Image (cartoon, rainbow, N blue to C red):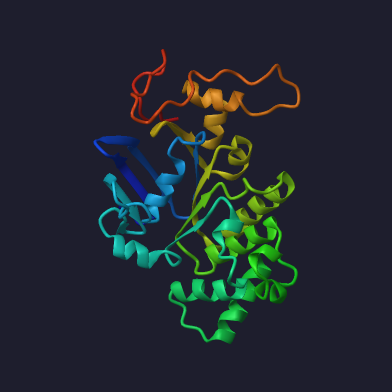
């Protein structure tokens, strides 16, 4: 693996065994993210975005009934074959920002207590006072006006936007090589969402962290990402530079996603080729698409 690639996924397949049946979720996913690059994985709900990120984090491989094949390398660690190593690397080499910040934080622990555990998990051997000072500095970097008060607060005492900033600060506290951001602004109103994404962009630029940004919001992706992968029913159907994808989308599903974006003046949302079926059903290739798989731009 080249030195500048921090995430490489090759021919990744995922299925869940349910009795005598196997529900196939991912069908040969391949993608990569280079050091300092911001890459978006775009698709509707249920297309396989979040499970791809969780496999990179090493969170699904050991679950009963899970069938995984292919390669997932994170900073040189094979996540599908070295679960202990990737578990030890979480928070240090790879971190994740979850979709709902309030549910991602434990409501019975103060922010300062959680932050201290995050720093220790990243291998930083600090005294309690030093950890608190480091946490306060990290919260100040994400523009939280009173870090000390925030550290003494429980998650339910903070707004959704504040909790999201806390999650960003925690995710970047150990300066990981890779940040997995699973729709980090979905639970927020549009103003706070925009502030959060600008903040995440600023922080990743500062730390040189690579980002796999998971979203179905194309307007956000257009502003944030360097490259885009489009995922449809567990298949990567198109990928390329962000400007190229938006200027000349080649796959009908990509075009449908763009047309489905709400507009101030419109005749209504377009009809997608079909509703999302069960994963066990075969992928229908619409006329003009060619064979399922990547369409490079």
Residue at the top extreme?
Answer: 287
Residue at position x 52%, y 51% in the image: 181
Residue at position x 30%, y 60% in the image: 83
Q: Which quadrant of the figure contains the C terminus? A: top left
Foreground residue, 291 or 62?
62
Residue at position x 57%, y 57% in the image: 103
List x then y, in percent, for residue 43: 50, 34
Vertical comparison of 30 with 276: above or below: below
Can residue 114 be seen from the camera position used here?
A: yes
List x then y, in percent, for residue 49: 45, 41
Residue at the front extreme?
Answer: 19
List x then y, in percent, for residue 106: 56, 65
In the picture, measured across the screen, residue 220 lies left or right of residue 290, that is right
List x then y, in percent, for residue 123: 43, 76
Vertical comparison of 164 with 144: above or below: above
Give the total number of marks visible in the rendering: 0
Residue at position x 58%, y 70% in the image: 108
In the picture, measured across the screen, residue 189 lies left or right of residue 200, that is right
Foreground residue, 17 or 30?
17
């Amino acid at each position: 693996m080249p030195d500048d690639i921090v995430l490489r996924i090759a021919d990744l397949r995922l299925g869940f065994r349910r009795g005598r049946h196997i529900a196939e979720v991912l069908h040969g996913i391949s993608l990569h993210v280079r050091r300092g690059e911001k890459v978006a994985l775009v698709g509707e709900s249920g297309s396989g975005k979040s499970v791809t990120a969780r496999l990179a984090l090493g969170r699904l491989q050991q679950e009963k009934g899970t069938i995984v094949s292919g390669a997932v390398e994170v900073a040189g660690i094979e996540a599908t074959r070295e679960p202990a190593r990737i578990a030890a690397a979480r928070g240090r080499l790879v971190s994740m920002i979850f979709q709902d910040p309030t549910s991602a934080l434990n409501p019975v622990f103060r922010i300062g207590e959680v932050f201290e555990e995050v720093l220790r998990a990243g291998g930083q051997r600090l005294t309690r006072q030093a950890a608190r000072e480091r946490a306060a500095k990290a919260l100040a970097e994400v523009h939280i006006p009173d870090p000390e008060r925030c550290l003494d607060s429980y998650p339910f005492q903070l707004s959704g936007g504040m909790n999201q900033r806390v999650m960003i600060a925690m995710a970047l506290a150990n300066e990981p090589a890779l940040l997995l951001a699973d729709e980090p602004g979905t639970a927020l109103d549009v103003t706070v969402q925009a502030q959060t994404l600008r903040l995440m962009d600023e922080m990743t630029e500062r730390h040189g962290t690579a980002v796999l940004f998971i979203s179905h919001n194309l307007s956000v992706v257009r502003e944030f990402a360097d490259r885009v992968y489009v995922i449809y029913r567990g298949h990567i159907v198109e990928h390329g530079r962000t400007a190229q994808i938006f200027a000349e989308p080649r796959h009908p599903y990509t075009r449908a996603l763009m047309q489905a974006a709400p507009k101030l003046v419109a005749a209504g949302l377009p009809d997608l080729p079909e509703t999302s079926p069960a994963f066990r059903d075969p992928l229908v290739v619409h006329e003009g698409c060619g064979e399922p798989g990547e369409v490079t731009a």
